[in-house]
Image (cartoon, helix red, strand yellow):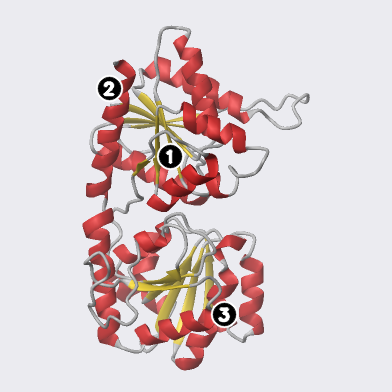
Amino acid sequence: MKIGITCYPTYGGSGVVATELGIELAARGHEVHFITYSQPFRLTGREANIRYHEVPVSNYPLFEYPPYDLALATRMAEVAEIYGLDLLHVHYAIPHSISALLARQMLAKRGIHLPFITTLHGTDITLVGLDRSYLPITRFGIEESDGVTAISAHLQQHTVEAFGVTRPIEVIRNFVNCDLYCRNEELITQQRPQFARPNERLLVHLSNFRPVKRVLDVVEVFARVARAMPARLLMIGDGPDRSAAEFLARRLNLADRVTFVGKQENVNELLPLADLMIMPSEMESFGLAALEAMACRVPTIATRVGGIPELIWDGRGEGVGGSAANGDSANGLLYDVGAVEAMAEGAIWILSDAARLDAMASAARQTAQDHFCTSRIIPQYECYYEQIVAQANA
């Protein structure tokens, strides 16, 4: 198939998922066209079967705010007509679904029908979409899409309740390349000494450091762990709360034990170095960072919010290898938002017992392999594409 993909190429998990989806589809023989304002940062530009089409935006002085959504719609229509796209797949509802709708309407005038699929990722529904300025247009974009997917059952249900949507929304969860995100003992031997000594546990956090990620809670949890055992913290990412987290680490006399490395493209090489992931988010529609860590045999302590319970199965009270509700082994711990003391106790409970840590690490990797590897999720997208294209051509 010939598939157009539009996403925010430099920010957030939606862009990461969209880019990785395009890479995986191209590897399976599909022709993928990224239509965005800049090249997605995870693309090298050398991938086979992938083309990038930049969206130019006019800076005419009359426009106080450049009309990116209109420029995007025009470019979508151009690329679709020139390259004979079978469908568009837009990630994040606003403004991408509306731009795709305009492109579809423009092409229809020329006898070309271009179906489009909208994938909902989280804040486009839970934050931006619920803003009164955007709620009606977000609902309209969802209703007018030829197909709609959500990355978790929680997000699907939230969309139905918040927007009164009656159309079907397919749940296709996020995924991870289990061949890329894995544990390489040789690499760990080489790189882990940069961040921790042999007798120290290494905790990790990965996010965009927005307030919803509660990175100050990460530092607070680590401070309590560090009082109980030799440990260090690796902070991957950047964003508005980074300076506050750095200041808190200094105030707690932890500056020499917390390493901030900023945004990194090689997170698949950094995550396996850690023993435990900390994710105290106020909201996560799925929890992609946790999944990437789990694929690397790094269990996660997280908050019981959004779609996280669909990924992490709590191991409290079940013992090593205990069965979670769905029959899989416990692969992490879940807590209420802001439960810093309890999360620290849970981290210490896991890290102080090598056998317990190894069991959860193995269960985490098994969860990724059994439920979320690209080999399991990408075919779901392919089937959905075929279904939407068939409906459009009927």
Of the two numbered discs 1 and 3 on the same chain, state the one appearing first in sequence.
1
Q: Amino acid at mark 2?
A: Ala
Q: Position of residue 387 (x, y in %)?
A: 28, 28
- Who is closer to the viewer here, 312 or 65? 312
Asked whether residue 219 is in view, the answer is: yes
Q: Which residue is mark 1?
A: 119
Q: Amino acid at mark 1?
A: Thr
| Image side of residue 252 versus residue 296, left or right | right
For the point 51% across and 37% down, which residue is it?
93
- Mark 1 or mark 3, whichever is nearer to me: 1
Q: Is residue 112 above or below residue 120?
A: above
Give the residue at the far bottom of this rendering.
Answer: 228
State the CA–CA distance, disc 2 to disc 1.
19 Å
| Tag 2–tag 3 contact (CB < 8 Å) | no
Q: Which residue is mark 3?
A: 220
Q: In what element is the residue under mark 3? A: helix
For the point 39% across and 15% down, which residue is it?
113
State the CA–CA distance, disc 2 to disc 3.
52 Å
Q: Is residue 351 above or below residue 392?
A: below
- Who is closer to the viewer here, 376 or 285? 285
Pointer 1 local density, CA inside 10 Å: few below 14, some 14–19, many at least 20: many
State the CA–CA distance, disc 1 to disc 3.
35 Å
Dividing the image into 4 quarters, which one contains the C terminus? top left
Of the two numbered discs 2 and 1 on the same chain, state the one appearing first in sequence.
1
Q: In what element is the residue under mark 1? A: strand
- Who is closer to the viewer here, 71 or 332? 332
Asked whether residue 43 is in view, the answer is: no
Q: Which residue is mark 2?
A: 390
Q: Is residue 331 above or below residue 354?
A: above
| Image side of residue 29 versus residue 225, left or right | left
Q: In what element is the residue under mark 2? A: helix
